[in-house]
Image: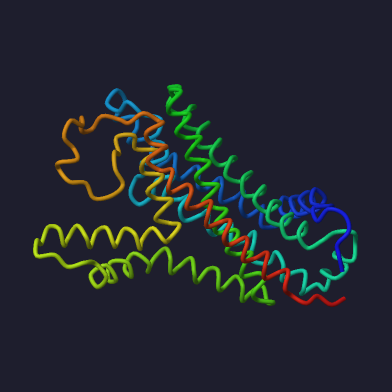
C-alpha cells in the first residue's frame, strides 16, 4: 500500500514526549548526581596545579579540562568514560521497551509512521544527552571562573565550545549503537549487556588488538626504521576504527594547541616549524576534521542500520 501524508508527521510530538520522559526519569536524577561529582572531581584535580602555573601557560583556562590530580583523573578522562555510559543508558531500551510493554502497536496505530517514531526517539535521547553535557560544561566553566578569578580568552572559549560539539558527536555514536541493539534484541537487559560489552572491547581491548594486528599486517621493509613506521601507521589506522581513539585524538588537538600532528612525523617534516608554538584554532579544527567527520559518519551508519532493521520487524497489536 502507498503511504499517505508525510512520513515525518508527528515527529515533534515524539521528540517532545521522549525528552520529557528522559528528563523526568530516575536515570536523569542519577545523571545529575554524576554531573555534580564529575564537576567537583575535575575542579579539585585541576585547580591546585593551575594556581601553580599562573603566568606560565598561555592557555591557562584550557588546563581546567586536561589537568588531573592523582588519583583523580582530568575532566576529559571523566568525560571519555562517562559519555558512553550515559548514551547507552538513554538508548538501550528505546525500542524493545515498547515491545515489553506491548505499546508499540498502539503507538503506530495512530497517524504516525515508523520513520517519525525511530527518528523522534533518537532526537529526544540526543537532546537529553546534549542538555547533560552542556550543563556539565557550564558547571565546570563556571566553577573555574569563580576559583581562578581569571577570564578566558576568546580562543579558549572557542576551543572549549568546539570540544563540547565533538563530545556531543562522540555521545551520538554510542547512542545510535545502543538503539541498534535495542532493535536487535527484544530483552532490554540483553541489549544493555551487548552495548556494554562492545564498549568494553573498544575501550580496553581494542588498542591491544590493534598493536598485535599491526605487526602482522604491516608491510615489511629492509630498513628497520621504515618497517617500524609502517607498523605505527597500520596500528593507528586500526585504532581509529574505535570512536574512543577518534575522540581522544580530537580532544588532544583542541585542548593542547601546541599539538601539530596526530600521527608519526619525520624530522624532515618539522623543518621550519617552531616547536612548542600553539596552532591557531582554524588549523586545529582542520587537524581534527577527519575525526569529527568519522564520528558523524559512524552515527549516520549506525542509525541507518537501526532504521532498516526496525522497518523490517513485524509488529502485532
Q: How many marks?
A: 0
| Residue 78 % position (x, y) | 45, 50
Q: Is residue 49 above or below residue 15?
A: above
Nearer to us in this view, 283 or 130: 283
Would you say 157 lies left or right of 102 here? left
Seen from this angle, which residue lies furthest left?
223
Seen from this angle, which residue lies furthest front?
2
Q: Is residue 166 above or below residue 28?
A: above
| Residue 169 % position (x, y) | 54, 49
The residue lying at 72 percent from left, 50 percent from top is 23
Toward which corner of the image does residue 195 lie, by quadrant? bottom right
Q: Quadrant of the C terminus?
A: bottom right
| Residue 128 % position (x, y) | 66, 49
| Residue 288 % position (x, y) | 41, 43
Toward which corner of the image does residue 270 lie, by quadrant? top left
Nearer to us in this view, 67 or 242: 242
Amino acid at each position: 500500500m502507498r503511504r499517505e501524508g508525510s512520513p515525518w508527521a508527528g515527529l515533534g510530538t515524539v521528540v517532545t514526549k521522549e525528552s520529557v520522559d528522559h528528563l523526568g526519569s530516575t536515570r536523569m536524577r542519577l545523571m545529575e548526581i554524576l554531573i555534580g561529582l564529575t564537576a567537583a572531581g575535575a575542579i579539585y584535580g585541576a585547580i591546585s596545579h593551575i594556581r601553580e602555573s599562573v603566568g606560565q601557560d598561555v592557555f591557562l583556562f584550557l588546563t581546567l579540562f586536561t589537568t588531573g590530580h592523582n588519583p583523580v583523573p582530568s575532566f576529559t578522562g571523566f568525560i571519555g568514560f562517562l559519555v558512553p555510559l550515559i548514551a547507552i543508558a538513554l538508548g538501550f531500551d528505546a525500542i524493545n521497551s515498547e515491545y515489553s510493554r506491548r505499546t508499540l502497536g498502539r503507538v503506530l496505530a495512530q497517524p504516525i509512521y515508523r520513520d517519525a517514531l525511530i527518528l523522534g526517539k533518537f532526537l529526544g535521547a540526543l537532546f537529553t544527552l546534549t542538555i547533560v553535557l552542556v550543563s556539565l560544561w557550564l558547571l565546570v566553566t563556571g566553577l573555574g571562573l569563580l576559583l581562578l578569578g581569571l577570564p578566558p580568552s576568546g580562543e579558549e572559549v572557542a576551543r572549549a565550545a568546539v570540544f563540547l560539539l565533538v563530545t556531543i558527536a562522540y555521545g551520538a555514536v554510542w547512542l545510535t549503537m545502543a538503539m541498534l541493539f535495542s532493535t536487535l534484541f527484544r530483552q532490554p537487559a540483553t541489549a544493555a549487556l551487548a552495548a556494554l560489552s562492545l564498549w568494553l572491547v573498544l575501550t580496553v581491548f581494542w588498542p591491544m588488538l590493534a598493536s598485535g594486528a599491526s605487526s602482522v599486517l604491516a608491510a615489511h621493509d629492509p630498513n628497520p626504521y621504515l618497517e617500524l613506521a609502517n607498523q605505527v601507521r597500520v596500528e593507528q589506522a586500526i585504532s581509529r576504527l574505535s570512536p574512543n581513539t577518534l575522540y581522544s585524538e580530537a580532544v588532544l588537538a583542541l585542548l593542547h594547541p601546541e599539538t601539530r600532528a596526530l600521527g608519526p612525523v619525520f624530522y624532515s617534516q618539522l623543518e621550519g616549524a617552531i616547536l612548542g608554538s600553539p596552532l591557531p584554532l582554524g588549523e586545529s579544527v582542520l587537524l581534527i576534521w577527519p575525526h569529527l567527520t568519522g564520528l558523524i559518519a559512524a552515527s549516520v551508519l549506525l542509525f541507518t542500520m537501526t532504521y532498516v532493521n526496525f522497518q523490517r520487524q513485524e509488529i502485532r497489536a
